[in-house]
Amino acid sequence: MTGAASLNRKCVVNTRALYQAGELDRMLRARGADPISYPCIDILPPEDTTELDAGLHAIADGEYDWLILTSENTALSLARRAQSLGWPMGALNLVRVAAIGPKTSEAAVSWLGVEPALVPEEHVAEALAEALKAESASRVFLPQSNLARTVLQDELRAAGFDVMPVAAYRTVIGRGGEDVPGLLAAHHVDAVIFTSGSTVDYFLDRLRTEGGNLTDLQDVCLACIGRATAAALEKHGLKATVVPTRYTLEGILTSMESYYSAFASERTK
């Protein structure tokens, strides 16, 4: 049997930032799963906003061809900073916007009042770089996390783009939530969902510092939203159980349903 029943009564750890966790919780409950709160990242403003502010003013002055948004967190952070500067919604409409995926695109519309002109079919930095290479551009503003990979700026620079990467926010370790180390030790966790490399790194940091043990993850489904997130797991000697072909929350849940359906079928043989 496939579909929502595949996740029925599964206990699933949600590692997303607290302000983002609600959407995934609702999607899990709609499929009959029980979400477990364990925010592993938090998003804070940069300690020094000088470079970010200079970049935003440069956009307003028409000095950039593209603004690249690599996450929902980027869109939210820019919206917060624009508000601090007293700018109205839609103030960044003077530049073409590229978003890494549909959720980031939706965040750009909701929080910034801008409609992205470019969203790649595959929602990863490498695909975004390839899509931008086909566009007419020279100067690119790239606000991102302080922990962001450099692959996007490296590929664009190699293609001749003038790229200005700036820390728009700090990704730090989260806190609070349920006693996941204890739940893992008691075998009360069926799956953990990771939506970024940062959620992987900080989940494992929290697990170690809060008395958990990596061996307790042995029979747990480790679901990663994409290849880069799965690679972050591999750096810690762990292997992703589920990686969807479409890098979205819907994609990861559908892949988990398929995984548990196949697992149930094997047990009945």
Image (spheres, rainbow, N blue to C red):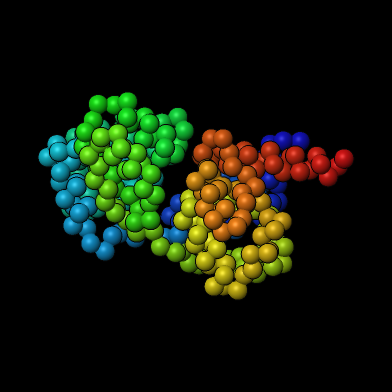
Q: In which quarter of the image is the N terminus?
A: top right
- Residue 201 locus on image (x, y percent): 50, 59
Kindly tell me whether residue 166 is visible in this rendering. yes
In-image side of 61 versus 84 (left or right): left
- Residue 116 locus on image (x, y percent): 32, 33
When asked about the image quadrant of residue 112, the answer is top left
Compare residues 42 and 55 and report the one nearer the observer.
55
The residue positioned 48% from the left and 67% from the top of the image is: 175
In-image side of 25 versus 219 (left or right): left
- Residue 239 locus on image (x, y percent): 62, 51
Q: Is residue 174 above or below residue 234?
A: below
- Residue 111 locus on image (x, y percent): 32, 44
Compare residues 163 and 248 and report the one nearer the observer.
163
When asked about the image quadrant of residue 178, the answer is bottom right
The residue furthest left is: 61
Kindly tell me whether residue 29 is visible in this rendering. no
